[in-house]
């Protein structure tokens, strides 16, 4: 199984190809150029380097949101165009699940936060569950130790005030690791107001990586979670400003009656 | 070189998601437009974020339909042309990213096209005899340009609007007299019931450049007239306002255009852009050009509105000149005509 992963949901542009549990290549940049200028040239470079025949891909895994509206659409349009031209399905990986997957296997709660402006973060809370691998219980003594870990959603991705998030984490009462571009924005708030033991992930795992999107994409693809390139669209988690304002006006006039 | 050049063209610069298949720049094999107008009407104009979201939702279906109506697959094509500016950046990026991905996956050459170059080139589709040089007026909701088309892909802008685009003035006046969005077709229709000489609205001249346009003064004059009527308690004849306003716009467009045609010594003149589908505008140009002995060209309304066939027409001439874009092609919202 060969999966192309794409993430352009935030500041990072990232592409990766994973095949049967092997990351054949990954190219990630976090630079001032726009994703429109970087994403496809990076994919072209990666394709050449690993001599990738695009026709051999099984699916394209896309970091499907939330994130920067424009960034998401650059990634989505790229994935949709590839899917259309190559006749391949897409796997939609929720952006925050992709981020959490960077910290695969850790026993703490994983809490990615992305700056969502308007005093909010896009966030979710995740953990890794553990069970014995298939057939391990009955088989020999050595094999009995092998476990399968899976990402479990404790709180599904959403847009919320970071202080509300900290209260949710306090209720859960477990150690937590923060990551994502929201850390730079809210580090001091977290330090002052987080009531559970916490830490911040280091550079190689604190931002979006297409390797994680491809790896988690493999899992979801195997579970049959695919969509057609035509039906895919980003999950913004937020309406456009114009729609919000219109709804508020509507609410206002309804209240006035 | 291969005999026929068949291009897939993609356009998403504003509120139409469009794809077309065009052969040799002049033969339209398909022209699919998903119009979002209804969606934006309730906001009184195009909302960029809503437009961008709709583009990403519709783009694959629109492309697929364009290919299937043309009876072509991607393997039958010679290249992909895409609008990369000017326009709404978020909207442009959808078409640009999609086109680049298809180009990358298929190996088909990619050609980034200027939106206005597309509008100008719309004239080639139905006027098989039209070749540069000629003068072209491009008037739409976002643009008012008077252009000398020196050669395919070679332009000199001799006049532009100093403030509102012509179509923008239509939208604003339509809103003021309660017609709603989009203003152009609604004013065009209502004008037929009104007297174009009922109200004397100003015809603005721009001192520094005789070919430039200015429509904000006219728009203000209409608003002032409406206010004055309201103050005096007089009933407004909306059809007369629409007809008189429209005549004022058309007069200026016709005068400036004909002045340019004569001064620069051309005998061919074309119109393009959404405003070019205005029936009174066409009639005015037809009459004036006939009188002046100038050959007049205009696209059908379907090629006046934003569409991808025109991008395919422009793309063909860039393609045969050897113009190619890289995978780093970006959307350029303020792209100037004739620049790359």
Image (cartoon, coloured by chain):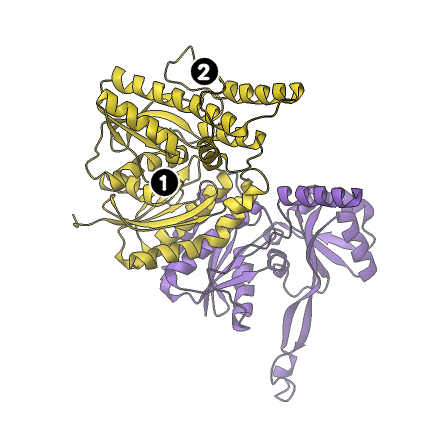
Q: Secondary structure at mark 2?
A: loop
Q: Secondary structure at mark 1?
A: helix
Q: Residue at x 44, y 52 (%)?
A: B59
Chain A: its colour in the image is: purple
B8 left or right, relative to A179: left
**Residue that numbered label 1 is attached to:** B301
**Residue that numbered label 2 is attached to:** B204
Query: Is residue B258 or residue A38 the one in the foreground?
Result: B258
Between the residue at mark 2 and the residue at mark 1, the CA separation in whole angstroms equals: 27 Å
A67 is higher (above) or lower (below) than B297: below
Q: Are marks 2 and 1 on the same chain?
A: yes
Residue B80 screen position, x and y as percent: 32, 48
* Label 2: few (<14), some (14–19) or many (≥20) C-alpha neighbours in 10 Å: some
* Residue A241, quarter of picture: top right
* Label 1: few (<14), some (14–19) or many (≥20) C-alpha neighbours in 10 Å: some
Query: Is residue A63 or residue A45 the one in the foreground?
Result: A63
Q: Quadrant of the C terminus of chain B?
A: top left
Q: Chain of mark 2?
A: B
The answer to whether residue B337 is seen in the rendering is: no
Residue B83 screen position, x and y as percent: 39, 41
B237 left or right, relative to B304: right
Q: Residue at x 21, y 34 (%)?
A: B130
What is the number of the mark on residue B223?
none
- N-term mark: 2 or 1: 2
Q: Which chain is yellow?
A: B
Residue A108 screen position, x and y as percent: 73, 62
Q: Chain of mark 1?
A: B
* Residue B146, quarter of picture: top left
């Amino acid at each position: 199984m060969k999966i192309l992963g794409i993430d352009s949901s935030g500041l990072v542009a990232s592409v990766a190809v994973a095949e049967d549990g092997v990351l054949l290549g990954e190219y990630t940049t976090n630079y001032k150029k726009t994703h429109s200028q970087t994403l496809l040239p990076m994919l072209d470079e990666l394709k050449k380097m690993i001599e990738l025949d695009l026709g051999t891909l099984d699916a394209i895994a896309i970091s499907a949101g939330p994130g920067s509206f424009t960034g998401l659409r650059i990634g989505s349009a790229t994935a949709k165009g590839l899917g259309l031209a190559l006749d391949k399905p897409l796997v939609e990986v929720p952006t925050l699940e992709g981020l959490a997957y960077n910290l695969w296997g850790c026993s703490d709660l994983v809490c990615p936060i992305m700056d969502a402006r308007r005093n909010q973060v896009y966030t979710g809370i995740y953990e890794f569950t553990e069970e014995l691998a298939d057939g391990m219980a009955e088989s020999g003594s050595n094999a009995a130790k092998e476990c399968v870990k899976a990402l479990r959603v404790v709180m599904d991705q959403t847009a919320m005030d970071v202080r509300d998030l900290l209260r949710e984490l306090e209720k859960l009462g477990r150690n937590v690791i923060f990551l994502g571009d929201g850390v730079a924005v809210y580090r001091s708030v977290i330090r002052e107001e987080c009531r559970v033991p916490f830490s911040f992930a280091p550079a190689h795992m604190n931002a979006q990586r297409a390797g994680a999107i491809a790896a988690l994409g493999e899992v979801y693809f195997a579970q049959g979670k695919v969509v057609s390139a035509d039906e895919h669209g980003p999950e913004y988690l937020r309406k456009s400003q114009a729609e919000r304002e219109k709804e508020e006006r509507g609410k206002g006039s309804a209240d006035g009656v | 070189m291969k005999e026929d050049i068949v291009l897939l063209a993609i356009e998403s610069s504003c509120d139409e998601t469009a794809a077309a298949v065009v052969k040799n720049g002049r033969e339209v094999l398909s022209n699919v437009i998903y119009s979002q107008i209804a969606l934006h009407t309730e906001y009184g104009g195009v909302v960029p974020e809503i437009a961008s979201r709709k583009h990403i939702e519709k783009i694959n279906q629109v492309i697929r339909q364009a290919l299937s109506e043309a009876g072509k697959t991607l393997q039958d094509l010679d290249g992909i042309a895409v609008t990369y500016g000017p326009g709404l950046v978020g909207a442009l990026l959808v078409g640009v990213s999609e086109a680049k991905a298809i180009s990358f996956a298929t190996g088909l050459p990619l050609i980034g096209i200027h939106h206005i170059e597309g509008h100008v080139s719309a004239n080639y589709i139905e006027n098989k005899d039209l070749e540069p040089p000629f003068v072209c007026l491009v008037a739409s909701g976002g643009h008012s340009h008077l252009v000398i088309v020196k050669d395919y892909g070679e332009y000199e802008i001799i006049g532009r609007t100093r403030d509102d685009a012509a179509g923008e003035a239509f939208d604003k006046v339509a809103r003021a007299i309660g017609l709603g969005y989009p203003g152009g077709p609604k004013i065009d229709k209502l004008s037929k019931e009104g007297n174009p000489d009922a109200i004397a609205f100003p015809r603005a001249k721009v001192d520094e450049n005789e070919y430039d346009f200015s429509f904000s003064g006219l728009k203000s004059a209409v608003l002032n007239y409406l206010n004055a009527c309201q103050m005096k308690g007089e009933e407004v004849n909306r059809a007369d306002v629409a007809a008189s306003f429209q005549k004022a716009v058309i007069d200026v467009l016709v005068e400036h255009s004909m002045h340019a045609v004569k001064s620069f010594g051309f005998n061919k003149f074309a119109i393009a852009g959404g405003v070019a589908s205005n029936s009174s505008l066409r009639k005015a140009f037809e009459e004036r050009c006939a009188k002046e002995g100038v050959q007049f060209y205009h696209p059908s309304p379907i090629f006046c509105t934003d569409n991808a066939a025109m991008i395919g027409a422009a793309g063909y001439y860039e393609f045969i000149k050897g113009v190619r874009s890289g995978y780093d092609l970006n959307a350029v919202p303020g792209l100037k005509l004739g620049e790359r």
